[in-house]
Image (tube, rainbow, N blue to C red):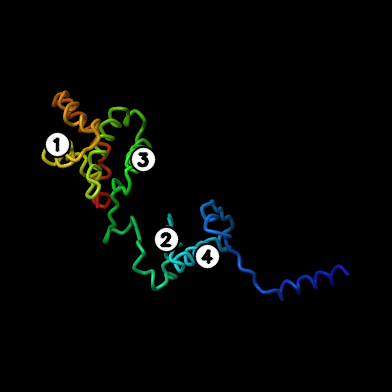
Amino acid sequence: TGAGRRDIILGALVEQPAQPVRFASLIDRFSHVYSVGQTGTGKSSLFREMVRQDMEQGRGVAVIDPHGDLIESILEVVPAERLEDVVLFDPSDTEYPCGLNMLEFQAERERDLIVQEIIVIFQKLFPAEFVGPVFEHNMRNALLTLMADQAHPGTLVEIPRLFTDEIFAKRYVTRLADPIVKDFWLRERNRISLEDQGETLQYIVSKLGRFIEDRLMRD
């Protein structure tokens, strides 16, 4: 009968050993995965197990968790041999802030990309009329200058000092290999009156205030 057939099928499913489910290769991991489900159906557990397995196999893995619950769960399953490899960046940690220098880079091809991404951030933070061509021009040259010393790049906090402290600025300008950026400091700015230079400085510093005046953000 139909009912009997279902019983047989269910019995066969119960008796079969569990089949492991995995990605066929590391190449498959480079594709996006979209996990959808109601609360409590195992989405976080799935990702936690993926991370745990990656750590056990010696792979590098990064987890971005806006809420923090998944991170806490992952920290409980870190293999003992990988404990020293873990870097926990918690922006809300005021006692032990983890510094994040946005101007650090590993390869030359990353430099312009980083500068453009930082400018895009400011374009999203402020209306278009407040981050026009003048801001972008000065900001781009300042960022590229602070990144001239790859081993010891400057930070966003030092941008105002770059425009006001000639001795400090010279440390980076002398390392510049880009003739266009070097010309910005040696010729272009010298052609601008001190009054206009002051207005430009205020124009830039006013956008950086939330980064350098807030102690937590500055750290």
Upstream in the sequence, badge 3 or badge 1? 3
Give the Cα separation between the discs numbered 3 and 1: 26 Å
Q: Position of residue 133 (x, y in %)?
A: 31, 27
- Between disc 3 and disc 1, the foreground one is 3
Identified by mark 3, the residue type is: Leu
Would you call the spot at circle 3 few (<14 residues within 10 Å), some (14-19), or many (20 or more)?
few
Upstream in the sequence, badge 1 or badge 2? 2
Q: In terms of image quadrants, where is residue 138?
A: top left
Residue 213 in view in this figure = no
- Between disc 4 and disc 2, the foreground one is 2
Upstream in the sequence, badge 4 or badge 1? 4
**Residue 60, numbered circle:** 2
Identified by mark 1, the residue type is: Thr
**Residue 93, numbered circle:** none
Upstream in the sequence, badge 4 or badge 3? 4
Determine whether the residue tagged by mark 3 lies in a helix, strand or loop: helix
Label 4 sits on residue:
45
Label 1 sits on residue:
164
